[in-house]
Image: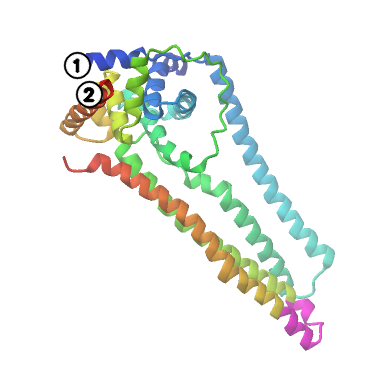
Amino acid sequence: MIFEEIYNTYWQKIFRLCMGYVNDNDIAQDLAQETFIIVWQQLPKFRNESNIGTWIFRIASNNCLRQIEKEKRIIKTELPINLKEENQESIEPKIQMLYKFISELPETERIIISLELEEIKQAEIANIVGLSEANVRVKIHRIKEKLMQKIKENEQ
Amino acid sequence: MNNNDIDFATIWQQQKVNQPNIEELLNKLKQFKKSNLQKLIISNILLLATSGFIIFIWYYYEPQFITTKIGIVLTILAMVVFVFSNNKLLSVFNKIDNTKNNNEYLQSLSELKTKQKYMQTTMLSFYFITLSLGICLYMYEYSSIMTTGWAIFAYFITLTWIGFNWFYIRPKIIKKQQIKLDELISKFETVNKQLNEKE
């Protein structure tokens, strides 16, 4: 698969994963860009043993997790961010709220629910995160309950 | 409100962002490659310049004693190793396979930080020992021309300074570095526990 194809297929998905993780448009764009740089670097090493989607989501979610280290370092990524940005102000409050609630979850739960909402098979999620499928199923169920709870609290 | 998965997923997928042009990304990639190459060149130039400097001192000042020569080499070696371990070397150790699953990745991250902690401490001690040894050896030739009193005085001053560095500055730096890394390690471990807690 050529890089350009991957880029076009996965950009939005990866962006959403990052956005769910940090709930900050700029940082999410940075993270998505970094992901594609890693993908580009690692692509020659990709063997068809695993699904390319799984492979890319692993890179993306690991990169998000590594964000923990960067928060501490304060220094912002060297990668340029001034790719043209349209303002995001217009997004619906419903979307904003969902992303906000997700980004408030514990780190790994953010990743799991993002993948689930991206409609990735639970077997694959298990493979990306490194848990058993049964475990993933239980977790997704719990996370959804948590989200529902938050939404209800918010409505009151 | 009756919510099911579809609600969430639909809302989730409505989040769109402008996809940066692929050309722009490819340009960034080129720059990225270039800057990596530049870093490599710069560190090599640094190494060559240092070697050149050692050779220059060696020939120009023509020290008579072998101790002086060893001293020069050790001192400069200490500095080079220090600079390298702070920049280049660490990035070599920073490489983790980022195509692992999250669970394994988090484990490697905390292992990496533990290793880094050890590396930093060892490197710093190595730096101080080599530097001190280098200076003491270097001084020997010149103090041997001095009167005994002055020679003792010179060594006394130097050793005091070295002692101050070793017993005060060094532990302070190490402590500072370790606090930072310990925080990271415990954070990575906490996140990893999220995955492995018993349901």
Circle 1 sits on which residue?
A: B3
Dominant SS in magenta? helix
**Amino acid residing under circle 1:** Asn
How packed mark 2 is, by other alpha carbons closer than 10 Å (few <14, some 14-19, many 20 or more), is some
For disc 1, the chain is B
Residue B149 pos. (x, y %): 77, 87
Disc 2 and disc 1 in contact, CB within 8 angstroms: yes
Q: Amino acid at mark 2?
A: Met
Q: Is residue B82 above or below residue A99?
A: below
Give me the C-alpha separation between circle 2 and circle 1. 8 Å
Q: In percent of the image, x 56 and y 29: which residue is there?
A: A79
Q: In the displayed structure, does residue A126 sit left or right of residue B53?
A: left
- Which image quadrant: the C terminus of chain B? top left
State whether residue B166 is above or below residue B99: below
Which residue matches tag 2?
A: A148
Residue drawn at point x = 28 percent, y = 20 percent: A117
A61 versus B90 height, above or below: above
Secondary element type, mark 1? loop
| Stretch of the chain drawn in magenta | B140-155
- The answer to if B143 sits in the magenta stretch is yes
| Nearer-the-camera pick, B189 or A102 | A102
Task: Please tell me the numbered disc located at residue B41.
Answer: none
Residues tagged by mark 2 and mark 1 found on one chain of the structure: no
